[in-house]
Every structure is written in C-alpha cells, then in structure tokens.
Image (cartoon, rainbow, N blue to C red):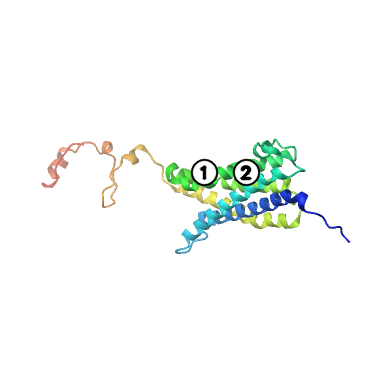
Amino acid sequence: MTPRVDPQPYLWWLVSRASGIVALALISCSVLLGLLMATKLLRRKGLNRTLVRLHEQLALAGLVGIAVHGASLLGDHWLKPGITGILVPFAIAYRPQYTGLGIIAGYLALLLGPSYYLRRRIGTRRWRSLHRATVLVWALGVVHALGAGSDGSTVWLRALVIVTGVPIVYLFALRMLQSATRAAGRPASTPATRRAAVDHGGRSHAPRAARGKPTDNERRNRPVDVPVTDP
C-alpha cells in the first residue's frame, strides 16, 4: 500500500503549480480569441461586443493567476525564492533561465493587459501594434511552463500546449500576412496627395500648387456666376 503523504508542507507549492497552469490556460485562450477576432475568422452580427468582453476578462483573470503563481512561491519552504527571486529575472537559483523568462512574461502581461483601457489615449493604431506583443507573453509562458514547471514533462501539459499553440501560431502568421497584404496594397502617401482637397461630392482635386494660375482662355470660358480667383 502506498503511504499517505501529508500535503501540508507542499501547500504553497501546490497553489503555485495550480495557479500557474490556470494562468497559462487563460492567457492561451485570451490570445487565441483575440487572434480569431483580429483575423476576422470569428465574425457574427451582434457577437463582437461579447467576444471583446470575454477577451478582456480572460486576460485579466490570467493576470490574477500570474500574480497568485508568483506570490504563493514566497511560502514555499523548499524553494525559498524571496522577493528578489520572484521579481528579478534570472536571480533565482532554481532553473534561472526558465524562471527568468517567466518573470519577463509576467511583466509584459502586466504592461499589455491593462493597455486596452488606455487605447484612446495612446491611439488605436499604436495600441494595436503594442497589443500584438501579447503573443510573446504566451510564448514566454509556454517556455517557462515546460522548462521550469514540475509538470513540464507530463503528457497532459504538452497536449494543452499543442492544442492551443498550433492554432495560435497559425492565426498569428495569418494576421501578419493580412497586415503585409494591406500595407502592400495601400497607395503611397506623398505631400502632394496629402494636400489634395476632396469636395463633398467625392471628387478628388489636384493640389493647388499643381494647378497653376488660370489662363486667359480659361478666364473667358468660365461661367459668369463662378468667381475667378487666383490660387
């Protein structure tokens, strides 16, 4: 018979282990949902607002999981990381490379997650470019979980990474391809085209400097009710 093990000495390690796995799952789902919306593969009338709200809630819940994952290690009597070990990348003695990448992922998540609420201040285009780095948070989290986690070699955790990772990589590549295609098809902007005025009827006019002054024939052929003014 297998002897019964008292979980009390390992309680904080178990809390950290569980919260880290939950955080990885939440961040993975949030990134996957965000890419599905960004690539327009998941579009239904009236559904977008619900998906955006769900995307935000998953990201915020992932941040909570990351915080619990790091803070609970302070009670681990075997690891004993201390404040420096959980806040300073690569400072901990336990697998410093992988734990350091996990700490960096946590800082990036803390920076990028709440940026959604600042998009009006920093500009939508700048926010979108910044928000793409959330894929990096996911990638660093995966490396951290597989390299530093005690469950890194288990089949179920690797299956979780594969099931969420394959569509994330595919959708991210598709998103980059869509952005490159739009950028290639966008007409180049020049000072002359930026100065061109467009009237209410949608007719595009040449820049004022390119038109030059009206000739004598143009002046004579103008309708009487149209004022003739030099540019």
Q: Indicate which disc residue 105 carries.
A: 2
Asked whether 203 or 175 is in front, the reply is: 175
- Element under disc 2: helix
In primary-sequence order, the first of circles 1 and 2 is 2
Q: Is residue 124 left or right of residue 32?
A: left
Asked whether 20 or 193 is in front, the reply is: 20
Instruction: Point out the residue furthest to the bottom here.
Output: 45
Asked whether 113 or 86 is in front, the reply is: 86
Residue 225 position (above or below residue 210): below
At 77% across and 49% down in the image, what residue appears? 9
Instruction: Point out the residue furthest to the left here.
Output: 224
Q: Is residue 226 left or right of residue 47?
A: left
Bin the neighbour count of mark 1 within 10 Å (Cα to Cα): few under 14, some 14-19, many 20 and up: some
Asked whether 164 or 184 is in front, the reply is: 164
Viewer can see residue 152: no
Image quarter of the C terminus: top left
